[in-house]
Image (tube, helix red, strand yellow):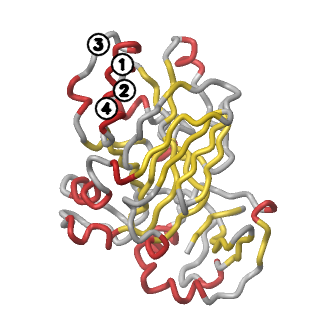
Amino acid sequence: MRLALFDDYRLGIVDGDRVRDVTAALPYPHDPDPLTAGWWRALCRDFADLSATLAGADGPEHALADVRLRAPVLNPSKIIAAASNYAEHVAEMHGVQERTLGAVEAWMMSFDVFLKATSSIAGPGEDIVLPAAVVAAGHEIHHESELVVVIGTGGRDIPVETALEHVFGYTVGLDITVRSPADRSRRKSYDTFSPLGPWVSTTADVPDPQALTIDLTVNGATRQHVHTADMLTGVAEIVAYASACMTLLPGDVVFTGAPPGVGPIAAGDDLRATISGLGELHSRVR
């Protein structure tokens, strides 16, 4: 099932080029304010019990072209991001850091997780806004296209063997990054630096998150192309690892790491990130 948030944060099921509004089938009051929309996190938690009801619900249909798609998450408690999770990306970062920092930060070449600000989330079609001060300072700002996990039931100390049972679904994400000496979380947390979309594909539609292909084009030219099987730490292991440090809550967002091929973006660029079976996320830069 492909679940989209659209217009005033209505819930829709996407089928082809149409979206069916199933908001009325939810057992919770619909709150259109994204800051207080606890119904979304409850849906992530309760989806196993609600999926059949939603799938069979009637509701008005709209052409996707006629609605405004929103980021397919609402007010998550946190964004977790994996670092150094593709071997070829780790290798290329030696050159990137030598060029942008003057030296290689060895500690950054090993897998780990860090946090991004939830206020950095942007939806499909929203512009990525380059911070004026960062541009003026001459720092490169890079794209990183990634498979993104949305947490379902959540939990603490989740075993690897059952970790995927705690996942609600998957979406396409861009982890926009300033290359500077600043802390990782700060460099990746500017407003609009976490575009997500176009919708969440629930786990029934993605039986194996390690069997997907990620592609990114910038102005029509391919920058990134990778298979998620190439991750050094798989999705289940990332979820388990993160949960050993922090309780994962329903609706939390997990970026799974940048593939090789990262590079600078500039005002006017057109980015299209695609993951097989999950759809295309389109963003422009200004």
Please report the residue visible at 34 percent of the width from the left and 14 percent of the height from the top.
98
State which tag comes first along the sequence, 3 or 4.
4
Residue at 65% x, 71% y is 14
Q: Quadrant of residue 31?
A: bottom right
In the picture, measured across the screen, residue 171 lies left or right of residue 102, that is right
Q: Answer yes or no: do the residues labelled 2 and 1 have beta carbons within 8 Å? A: yes
The residue labelled by disc 2 is 92
Give the alpha-carbon distance from disc 2 to disc 1, as whole Å. 6 Å
* N-terminal-most mark, 4 or 1: 4
Q: Are marks 2 and 4 in contact (CB under 8 Å)?
A: yes
Q: Amino acid at mark 2?
A: Glu
Residue 129 quadrant: top right
Task: Identify which residue, 81 or 97, lies in the foreground.
Answer: 97
* Residue depicted at 46% across the width and 47% down the height: 146
Q: Is residue 177 left or right of residue 246?
A: right
Q: Tell whether 199 sits left or right of 202.
A: right
